[in-house]
Every structure is written in structure tokens, then in C-alpha cells.
């Protein structure tokens, strides 16, 4: 499968980010974004793989590419993402070294109740 990676720096509603696309036969089949890449708390979001192409390691590839991009370009030591507590991907993120964390004794969550998870970069 000859998949092409395309990386685009964008700004959406004032939020800077780096968008990663996997392109196959001129169609976007997977995406992922790094939000706030130049601030203290860059995070991974909008991971999506078109249904037909799931289960082949494309998300993992975009995950690794984004981690490498952060290591090469960002002055930060950890990355974050958020996930709903019921999403099966939570267990995957845990396997990849992400942990939920507390601030002022409370589990850190987004305004709409998703769990924040973070991982230190080596
Ligand atoms: C979640 C999603 C991005 C996974 O994409 P994918 O390309 O199929 O994932 P990969 O093949 O790269 O798999 C990466 C890892 O996730 C695991 N995984 C993938 N989908 C999974 C699922 N639905 N449930 C449990 N584990 C899953 C794989 O087993 C693999 O684990 P491993 O590296 O430990 O072996 C894709 O199913 C999707 O776009 N879903 C809809 C959007 C979504 O739920 N995004 C996540 C929101 S936090």
C-alpha cells in the first residue's frame, strides 16, 4: 500500500496546530493533529482513520510520526491527549505510556468530562 504522508501547519479559531494526513490514491484516509505545538502543553487530537483502513497500524504510525515531530520541534517534555473513560482507546494509550493525572487532588478532565492523559517524552 503506497501511502503518502502530508504535514500542514494551520490555525483554527486561533489555535495553532500541525495537521498530519495519510493519503492513498489521492484521498485522505487518516488524520491526526498536534495542537498548541509551541506551548507548554502540546497535545494530540483528532486521530481518525477511515473505517475501511482501520486495524493496519495507520493510527500508530501517525502517533509515532507526531511524537517524533514534537521531539524534533517543540521545547516540551511531555504530551497530552484526552479520551472518554469508556473509549477502548484509553487502554491503548495506557499501553503506550499515558496516564491520567490529578490537579489539586482531582482527576484532570476537559470541560465536557473527557479524561486528560499525559506521557513524558524520553
Ligand atoms: C481509534 C482509531 C483511530 C484506531 O485507528 P487504527 O488505524 O485502526 O489503529 P491501529 O491499527 O494503528 O492500532 C493501534 C493500536 O490501537 C489498538 N486499537 C485500534 N482500534 C482499537 C479499538 N477499537 N479497540 C481497542 N484497541 C484498538 C490496536 O490493537 C493497536 O494496539 P497495539 O499497538 O498495542 O497493538 C480508529 O478506529 C478511528 O478512527 N476511530 C474513530 C475515532 C476515534 O475513536 N478516535 C479516538 C478518540 S480518542
Image (cartoon, rainbow, N blue to C red):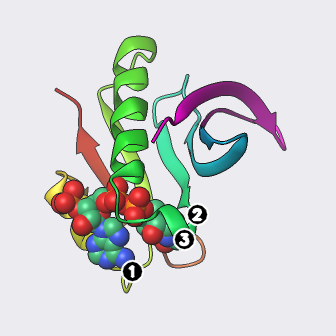
Residue at image point 17% right, 51% down = 97
**Farthest residue, direction bottom:** 86
The magenta region covers 1-21
Residue at image point 59% right, 34% down = 36
Count of labels in the image: 3
Q: Which mark is residue 51?
A: 3
Q: Nearer the viewer, mark 2 or mark 1?
A: 2
- Could you tell me residue 91's position as x and y percent? 22, 71
Q: Quadrant of residue 9?
A: top right
Looking at the image, can residue 103 be seen?
no
**Would you say the residues marked 2 and 1 are in contact, meaning their CB atoms lie under 8 Å apart?**
no
Q: Residues within 10 Å of mark 1 (few under 14, many from 20)?
A: few
Which residue matches tag 1? 87
Which residue matches tag 2? 50
**Would you say the residues marked 3 and 2 are in contact, meaning their CB atoms lie under 8 Å apart?**
yes
- Compared across the picture, whether 74 is left or right of 112 comes to left
Instruction: Determine if the C-beta at disc 2 is less than 8 A from ligand 1.
Output: yes
Mark 2 residue element: loop
Instruction: Determine if the C-beta at disc 3 is less than 8 A from ligand 1.
Output: yes
User: What kind of secondary structure does the magenta stretch mostly adopt?
Assistant: strand
Q: Is residue 62 above or below residue 67?
A: below
- Compared across the picture, whether 31 is left or right of 97 comes to right
Q: CA distance from mark 1 to mark 3?
A: 16 Å
Viewer-nearest residue: 55 or 121: 55
Q: Is residue 46 above or below residue 113?
A: above
Q: N-terminal of the two: label 1 or label 3?
A: 3
**The N terminus: image quadrant:** top left
Amino acid at each position: 500500500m503506497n501511502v503518502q504522508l502530508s504535514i500542514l501547519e494551520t490555525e483554527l479559531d486561533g489555535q495553532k496546530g500541525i495537521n498530519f494526513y495519510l493519503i492513498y490514491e489521492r484521498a485522505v484516509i487518516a488524520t491526526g493533529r498536534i495542537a498548541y505545538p509551541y506551548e507548554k502543553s502540546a497535545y494530540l487530537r483528532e486521530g481518525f482513520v477511515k473505517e475501511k483502513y482501520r486495524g493496519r497500524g495507520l493510527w500508530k504510525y501517525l502517533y509515532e510520526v507526531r511524537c517524533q515531530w514534537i521531539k524534533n520541534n517543540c521545547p516540551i517534555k511531555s504530551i497530552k491527549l484526552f479520551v472518554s473513560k469508556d473509549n477502548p482507546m484509553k487502554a491503548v494509550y495506557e499501553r503506550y505510556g499515558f496516564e491520567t493525572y490529578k490537579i489539586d487532588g482531582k482527576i484532570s478532565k476537559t470541560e465536557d468530562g473527557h479524561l486528560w492523559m499525559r506521557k513524558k517524552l524520553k
